Image (cartoon, rainbow, N blue to C red):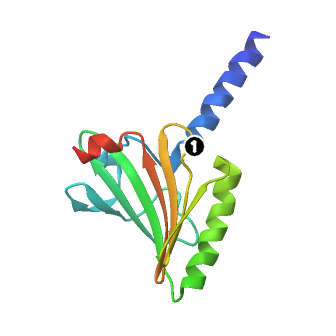
Amino acid sequence: MMRWSLAFMFFSMLCATAHAQAFGLRMGMPIEKLDIIGAEGSYLLVNPPRPHAELTKYMVRATPKAGVCSISGSAEVDTFQKAVDIQQRLERRLIERYGTGESIEVRYTRSLVFPDAPSPLLHVITVADDDEVSLTYIFENTDICSN
């Protein structure tokens, strides 16, 4: 019985860790472990550990003190409709993982925010506009990056 309890506990921790990652990065991951270009907090991530097939550019917000605070994956598109199509595919997967999000529409930008994402994710946000679609994961340590 004790063996099953330990196995269940390990499996639960493993699942929580898997959900707490974004494109293979986790909150607080040190800058030195990232393949990045840039300086002063905002970096282009050259090779994300787990890229998304429809996203081509990745930006990381990180500091030496806090490590990774947020990561965004994006793709340039020809039309707003193409951006919305990609966003909807992303959102279906996010809804499966995090539950229903809150829809926000401002002018030509459509966003879906998942405020109830599991810790250490603070927010998960998708955005579609005329020439780009993006998916951003913001971790709970984002305030440390801002200071």
Q: Secondary structure at mark 1?
A: loop
Looking at the picture, tell me which residue is in the foreground, 105 or 72: 105
Q: Residue at x 60, y 35 (%)?
A: 16
Looking at the picture, tell me which residue is in the foreground, 2 or 123: 123
The quadrant the N terminus occupies is top right
Residue 23 appears in the figure: no
Residue lying furthest right: 1
Residue lying furthest bottom: 78
Left of 30 or right of it: where is 125? right
The image shows residue 70 at horizontal and vertical percentages of: 39, 52
The image shows residue 63 at horizontal and vertical percentages of: 25, 47
Q: Residue at x 59, y 42 (%)?
A: 18
The quadrant the C terminus occupies is top left
Name the residue type under label 1: Asp
Tell me: residue 53, above or below residue 62: below
The image shows residue 26 at horizontal and vertical percentages of: 45, 44
Q: Residue at x 48, y 38 (%)?
A: 120
Name the residue beneath numbered marker 1: 116
Q: Quadrant of residue 72?
A: bottom left
Tell me: residue 145, above or below residue 52: above
The image shows residue 15 at horizontal and vertical percentages of: 64, 37
Residue 141 appears in the figure: yes
Residue lying furthest top: 2
Q: Label 1: how many residues lie within 10 Å, few (<14), some (14-19) or many (20+)?
A: some
Q: Quadrant of residue 28?
A: top left
Q: Residue at x 43, y 44 (%)?
A: 139
